[in-house]
Amino acid sequence: MKEQFATYEIALRLKELGFDKSCLAIFSENNSFKISMFGQRFYTIIETSDDFAEDIEINDVLAPLWQQVIDWLREKRVIIELNWSEEHNINYFTPVTRFGHKKFIGIRTYKYEEAREHAILKALEIIKSA
C-alpha cells in the first residue's frame, strides 16, 4: 500500500513549501513510514475537532497520497500532465503548466510512476523558484 503515497523526498519538499493537508500516513523522524490503520486516525499539522485525529511531531513529515499532491499543485496553479506517446513506444512525458504557460519538461520512460514522480519534482521546483 505504501506505493499509493508520495515518496519521502517529495513529502519533505512539500513540507518545506507549506503543505498542510490531512494525511493518512507520515514519515517519522527516522524516515520510517507509518500509516493509520483502518482510517481511524488522520495525521495533521492543524487543529481539528475529529476525535480520531492525531497531531504529528515537529520532525515528522506528512505522507500524502499521489492524488493529494497533484491536487495541491493544482491549488498552487501548477498543473502536470502525463501523456502517452504511441510514436515513442508507449513512453510518458511530462508537460508542466503554470499560469497558462506550458513548459515542456520531458522524460521518456516505460513507467507511468516514474514519469509522475519526475513531473511532480519539476513542479515543486517551479513553485519553489516563484
Image (cartoon, rainbow, N blue to C red):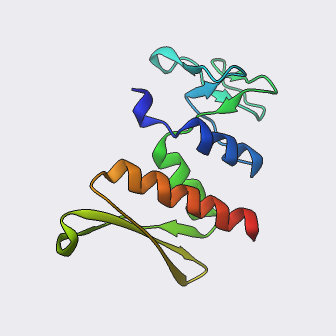
Q: Which quadrant does the N terminus fall into? A: top left
- Expressed as whole percent of the image width and height from the top left, the position of residue 98 reads 59, 76
Residue at 49% from the left image edge and 60% from the top image edge: 119
Q: Which quadrant does the C terminus fall into? A: bottom right
User: Which of 20/93 is in front?
Assistant: 93
- Expressed as whole percent of the image width and height from the top left, the position of residue 55 reads 74, 23
Left or right: 109 in relation to 116: left
For this orientation, the residue located farthest to the right is 58
Residue at 63% from the left image edge and 18% from the top image edge: 52
Residue 20 visible in the displayed image: no
Residue at 69% from the left image edge and 32% from the top image edge: 61
Left or right: 17 in relation to 69: right
Above or below 97: residue 5: above
- Expressed as whole percent of the image width and height from the top left, the position of residue 60 reads 72, 27
Toward which corner of the image does residue 33 lie, by quadrant?
A: top right
For this orientation, the residue located farthest to the bottom is 101
Left or right: 14 in relation to 105: right
Above or below 70: residue 25: above
- Expressed as whole percent of the image width and height from the top left, the position of residue 105 reads 49, 72
Residue 130 visible in the displayed image: yes
Above or below 32: residue 108: below
